[in-house]
Image (cartoon, rainbow, N blue to C red):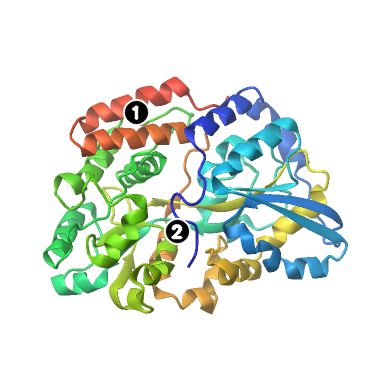
Amino acid sequence: MSNPSRRGVLRLTAGTALLGTLALTGCGRGDETTTAKAAAKPIGTAPATGTVNVWATQDDASVLDKVIKPFKAANPDVTVKFTLIPNHEYYTKLQAAIAAGTGPDVAQFFPESQAQFLDPSILQPVPDGLVDSGAFFKSLWDAGVVKDVAYTVPWYAYTYALVYRADLARKAGVKAPTTWDETVPFLKALQGAGATRGLGADIGWDIFNGQDVAMYAWQAGGSLVSSDGKWTLDTPAMVDALKYNASFFTSGTADTAGPTFLDAQPYFVSGKTATMITGPWVVGQLDTAAKKTGWTAANVATAPLPAGASSDVSFSGGGSWGVLATSGNADASWKLVRYVSEPSTQVAQYKAYSSLPAVVSAWDDPSIKGQPLLDAFFTQLKKTRAFPQVSSWQQVSTRLGKEMEAVAKGTQTAEKAAASIQAYAESVGTGTK
């Protein structure tokens, strides 16, 4: 599986998020909701015509021109032009093009970082009846909806699950943990079976760590933003989440010094670490890291995340598509999005690039269903939430990551860190009216 890694796909940085916050502050999202709903007119079944310009990142979309060959054959009078942009430049260039009015017809987005684009001044609402919203993993669809208006259609999906050394677990006589309380003992057991550290924890202390602690806060019964749009980060649930993450380090089952991001898989294969909390792309990369075909099948297992006091919910991520408000060929653009959203097309995308489908029924295809190590991710995807649909979430998530570092290293209490996070979030606001 060659799906993009945690940092291999661009997630909006705090600096770019600020641009999005400024862009949306003046556009009156709430004032235009009625207009947006009215504009979401159905798209017909007549063949698409004209030119559709598509912008996407270089990873998953690199095979899309091949995947949509049947669409182009069925619509001979349409021309689809792809512009593939390096991941680290993508959102910056897209933001600039939108501001200049020179954006594409169709653009790729990421459900976990697209909130600043979900506005009728930037994206057209999804037309009525274009797709069945219930066909997708719910949290992925929800990530594109603001005030009952959908602006994006999910394309591929991922979430986090537990990837662990099954051989060491068998040697230790333990099963994958199902609760927070069982997690550190499980990690210690794997260390007793030969691993140097039980967990290869992410030590980037950045936006991605912030996403992790947000996930743990959900598991502890918390929320990130209240129903009336206010930050809710200084809560017992957030304190519990910070303590849970820190427990990996204070117990000695994880190390604040490593592995670094690029070392994660070599450490796991060599036994320097025995588990990872990560996405499904790792499954297809471990044989390469081990330099041995079949190593993963013999030595690795996956499991849903352990549950906190409230649940074992994770977050949803992936790719999505939106049609820009400035598109000159919306009809053909939406027809392309509809085609890419069909189960058969998503299966074709999986076969071409291993991008896991956002359409639930596509997971029944033998090419996916026959991969046992993906089962835990499918189970977990049905228990996911979308991150807050506020344009400052990326900034807040980055701050969360830094506060996590202080708690993990013992230089800050979880309580003070939660208060600091809340104060920072209130200072930047939510970027919406």
Q: Is 197 placed above or below 228 here?
A: below
Q: Which label sits in the foreground, 2 or 1?
A: 1
Q: Position of residue 272 (x, y in %)?
A: 22, 61
Q: Secondary structure at mark 1?
A: helix
Q: Which disc is residue 421 wearing?
A: 1
Q: Residue at x 42, y 29 (%)?
A: 231
Query: At 63% across and 64% down in the image, what residue appears?
Result: 63
Q: In the image, residue 279 lies at what x, y percent?
A: 41, 58
> Which residue is denoted by mark 2 in the rendering?
381
Q: Is residue 87 left or right of residue 102?
A: left
Q: Quadrant of residue 278?
A: bottom left
Residue 112 in picture, x, y percent from top left: 50, 45
| Percent coordinates x, y for residue 15 in the rendering | 51, 30
User: In the rendered image, which quarter is residue 36 located in?
Assistant: top right
- For image coordinates 31% across by 58% down, the residue present is 276
Q: Which of the numbered marks, if any, corresponds to residue 433?
A: none
Instruction: Please tell me whether mark 2 sits on a helix, a strand or a loop.
Output: helix
Farthest residue to the top: give it. 427
Tag 2: amino acid: Leu
Q: Is residue 174 visible?
A: yes
Q: Is residue 46 above or below residue 395?
A: below
Label 2 Cα crowd, 10 Å radius (few <14 / some 14-19 / many 20+)? many
Please, what is the three-letter code of the amino acid marked with disc 1? Ile
How far is mark 2 from mark 1, CA to CA?
Answer: 28 Å
Relative to 191, is 396 on the left or the right? Answer: right
Viewer-proximal residue among 6 and 312: 6
Q: Residue at x 48, y 75 (%)?
A: 369
